[in-house]
Amino acid sequence: MLLTTDPFSILTVVVAPAVLTNASSVLALGTNNRLARVADRVHAATSQLAQLDPGSRDYQFYAAQLPDLQTRAQLLLGALRCFYWGLGLFASSAIISIAGSIVVYYGRPAAFVIAAGIGVVCGASAVIAMVCGSVFMIRETQLAVKGLVYTTKSHASQ
């Protein structure tokens, strides 16, 4: 069915990237919050290290956390980059879809085909970026759980 005869197909072409843009924004916001929590933990650990004797057990406990916290921060930063790329690409896909709908209205089928191709490439690239960001988040979550287990075991043995 042609896009010009079915208004719902035009709406679908425009709304789908917009909904995915919103989902990307939510993922980016949550990732930003996680990055802030990691930064808070780094600041707390380094503050404690500054007050403790380097040979003490507590010093070793806080010092052991820093490498994993640094890795978590790097993973979260990578995830944020991917989510922001996805966000921008989904937004681009929405704008390109709107432009493609406009050129259909004015009877420019060749321009529509080009816009549709670019829109699909942007949308597919955005999905790839979101998947990559999610992989970073999975790895970061594994490290966060590892840190919780370490903290629990260290406090239980005291």
Image (tube, rainbow, N blue to C red):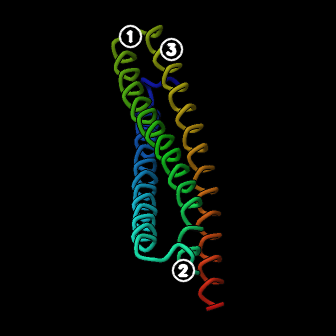
Label 3: few (<14), some (14–19) or many (≥20) C-alpha neighbours in 10 Å: some
Which residue bears the numbered disc 2? 58
Q: Earlier in the sequence, mark 3 or mark 2?
A: 2
Task: Please identify, in this view, whether the residue under mark 3 or under mark 2 is nearer the observer.
Answer: 2
Place residue 72 in its image quadrant.
Answer: bottom right
Residue 41 is labelled as none
Residue 78, horizontal then vertical, whole percent: 52, 44
Mark sitting earlier along the chain (3/1): 1
Q: Position of residue 114 (x, y in %)?
A: 49, 13
Whether 115 is drawn above or below 63: the answer is above
In the image, residue 3 sits, relative to residue 30, either above or below, namely above
Residue depicted at x 41% and y 35% = 88
Closer mark to the observer between disc 3 and disc 1: 3
Q: Nearer the viewer, residue 79 or 38?
A: 38
Nearest the viewer among 113 and 147 is: 147
| Residue type highlighted by circle 1 | Gly
Three-letter code, disc 2 = Asp
Q: Indicate the position of residue 153 as horizontal and vertical percent values.
A: 66, 83
Label 2 to label 1: alpha-carbon separation: 73 Å
Mark number, residue 107: 1
Picture disc at residue 113: 3
Q: What residue is rendered at 55% in x and 50% in y?
A: 75
Mark 2 lies on a secondary structure that is: helix
Q: Nearer the viewer, mark 2 or mark 1?
A: 2
- Circle 2 crowding by C-alpha within 10 Å: few under 14, some 14–19, many from 20: some
Horizontal placement of 50 versus 132: left or right? left
